[in-house]
Structures are given as C-alpha cells and as structure tokens.
Image (cartoon, rainbow, N blue to C red):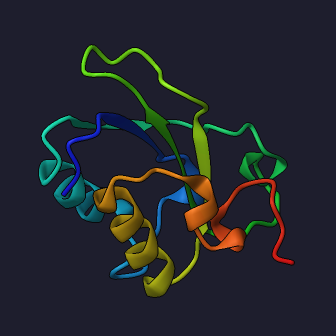
Amino acid sequence: MTERPFTVALCQAGPCRSSEPGLDMVPRLAAAVRRCPHGVLLRTGCLLRTPRCRPGAAHDNGCHLIVQPCDIDRSPRGAAIPIGPILSQADAEAVETWLTDGDLDADRLDPRLRVGRQPA
C-alpha cells in the first residue's frame, strides 16, 4: 500500500471494456485504490483519442489508463503516466502491483505497458 496520492483515469470506451473474465480492470483497480488512502479512481471515455476507438477500426481490446501522481489536494505532481494496452492477467497484475507499491515510476513498468514506448 502506498501513502502517495494519485488519480487513475480508466478508459471505458468500446475497445477498452474487456468482456474477458479477469481482465475487467474496474474491480481490480477499485480494490487497489481502496488499499491506498490517497488514491482516486475515475472511469471515463476515450483517453487517448486513438484510431482504434473509431467505429470499424481494428483494435487489440486492451484497456488503457492514465495515472497522475498528485499531492493530497489533488494538484498534479509530475507527468501523467499513460498505460496500456492491458492484454492479459499478467499485465493486469503487473499494473495493480506497480500502483500499490507506490513508486509510480513509469520505468518500473514493462515497456510494452508504457504507451508510446516500445520494448528494446
């Protein structure tokens, strides 16, 4: 559990809503946020305005979210961290663990979970 304040914005647009059991990030993130006294979870529409969200576009059905480190008054502290797509149970567990550990360093996430960064 972390004492560090953060806000998680979870995309609930079409391709980000998983119908696969265990990959619905709402209950997973809600449980993680409840363990963190200064964590907040928001559900929202498309966060990234990506082509995959347009009707008829091919997409990977992976969830995307953005984590914003902040202070106790919810003022941003540092850059927002876009995460996704979350495509497997292992991805979901990695994000949940990363969030509750509290470091909120994007470099501690697997490179394929960091939006805009490709694995080496």
Q: Quadrant of residue 35?
A: bottom left
In the image, is residue 18 above or below residue 106? below
Left-right relation of 82 to 97: right
Percent across and percent down for residue 77 are 48, 24
Where is the C terminus found, in terms of image quarters?
bottom right
Left-right relation of 17 to 100: right
Left-right relation of 58 to 60: right
In the image, is residue 49 above or below residue 61? above
Identify the residue shown where x is 64% and y is 67%: 113
Q: Nearer the viewer, residue 115 or 23?
A: 115
In the image, is residue 100 above or below residue 41? below
Q: Quadrant of residue 97?
A: bottom left
Percent across and percent down for residue 112 are 71, 72
Percent across and percent down for residue 67 are 48, 42
Percent across and percent down for residue 74 are 33, 18
Identify the residue shown where x is 75% and y is 66%: 59
Where is the N terminus found, in terms of image quarters?
bottom left
Left-right relation of 110 to 37: right
Q: How many marks?
A: 0
Q: Quadrant of residue 98?
A: bottom left
Identify the residue shown where x is 38% and y is 77%: 93
Q: Nearer the viewer, residue 26 or 84?
A: 84
